[in-house]
Amino acid sequence: MTCVHLAYSTPIQSDTQLLPRVQRNDRATNLTAALAKLGYGPCPEGLTIDPDLQLASVLPEDPTIINVAHFIATLGQDDIAGQIPPQDFSTALYPRPVIRLRVPPSKRTIRREYVIWGVFLAVGHMMDYSPMGFVPSHYTLLFDEEEVGGVSFGIPATADGQVSTTERVTARGEPDDIGIVSRADPIGQGISAPNTIAQATNSRLSVICGYDGDNPLGKNDLLATLMLVMVQATIPPSDTRIQGEWAPGWLDGHTRFFARATGRATEPYLTYGRMIESLARAVDFLVNNNRYNHFSMTIGVDRVLVGQGWFRHR
């Protein structure tokens, strides 16, 4: 079983590309226990990743992070037990790099849950182990030691040098979905916007993000935790209503993301699918501002307040 490391402060040295497989798997067992202790559910039992990093070049870090967040958000809207075919993914804002999903010749599809966890674990691996950060790479996904698929990160090109668009899947919504929500255009009546705002949305969902104070957090720690929370939110059906407070866990026992629904019993209300999309918008907000502090967000649907979220020390 392989799960994500929760601290990314000590990358490997540049002359060491990969940890031996036995060490990775032994370490993963300990990390699974650590995740459970912090309140996070484990990744699918038997799922492992086998990385192949190309250290001769690098990928643009921020576009890679944003594309991964929206890839998880897009896949998380459907049944994670369902099957999906090979495909490429990027966002309209960042057509490069491309996340490429492939399956072995003997298979036509792969379980959506494996892809979501595999992409997340791959990002954690690059944050944790790659001496050059985000690099072109391929991660073979194994379940009970049998290959079930693979995920690649790169900038594929056709013979004429253009990026291939074969089987391209883009993030849900229109190309201008990532934008600015005006302070003069609040969600509903009497809702105060946070002190710094950003993000716009699709036709229904609106997210306003703002910083709470000036308490810097590690970039990788914060982004990896947000993406882990996104993955956790894919476990229930996406249309399941969040009731009361949802607090999936802690980072290092001190820093926590939690959300609170407004208690609406009829539509519109906060669902796990909307929570996932809102968290992807929060990743946009942090990356676009290049500021990784405690933050809060206000979530609305059809201009009706449905919930709020916070990431801060307890």
Image (cartoon, grey):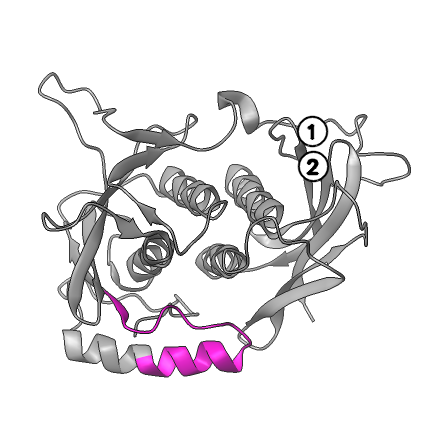
| Residue at horizontal 81 percent and vertical 54 percent from the top | 263
The segment highlighted magenta reads 29-48
Residue 103 place in picture, x, y as percent: 18, 48
Q: Are discs 2 and 1 less than 8 Å apart at CB?
A: yes
Residue 197 horizontal/vertical position (percent): 69, 37
Q: Quadrant of the C terminus?
A: bottom right
* Mark 2: few/some/many CA within 10 Å (<14, 14-19, 20+): some
- Residue 67 position in % (x across, y down): 40, 39
Q: Is 112 located above or below residue 41 in the figure?
A: above
Q: Is residue 308 visible?
A: yes
Residue that label 2 marks: 197
Q: Quadrant of residue 143?
A: bottom left
Q: Quadrant of residue 92?
A: top left
Residue 86 is covered by the magenta coloring: no
Q: Which residue is mark 1?
A: 181
Asked if the magenta segment contains residue 34, the reply would be yes
212 shown above or below 20: above
In the drawing, does residue 239 fall left or right of residue 193? left
Bin the neighbour count of mark 1 within 10 Å (Cα to Cα): few under 14, some 14-19, many 20 and up: some
* Front-lying residue, 190 or 184: 190
Q: Identify which residue is drawn at 73% across, 60% down.
A: 243
Which comes sooner in the sequence, label 2 or label 1? Answer: 1
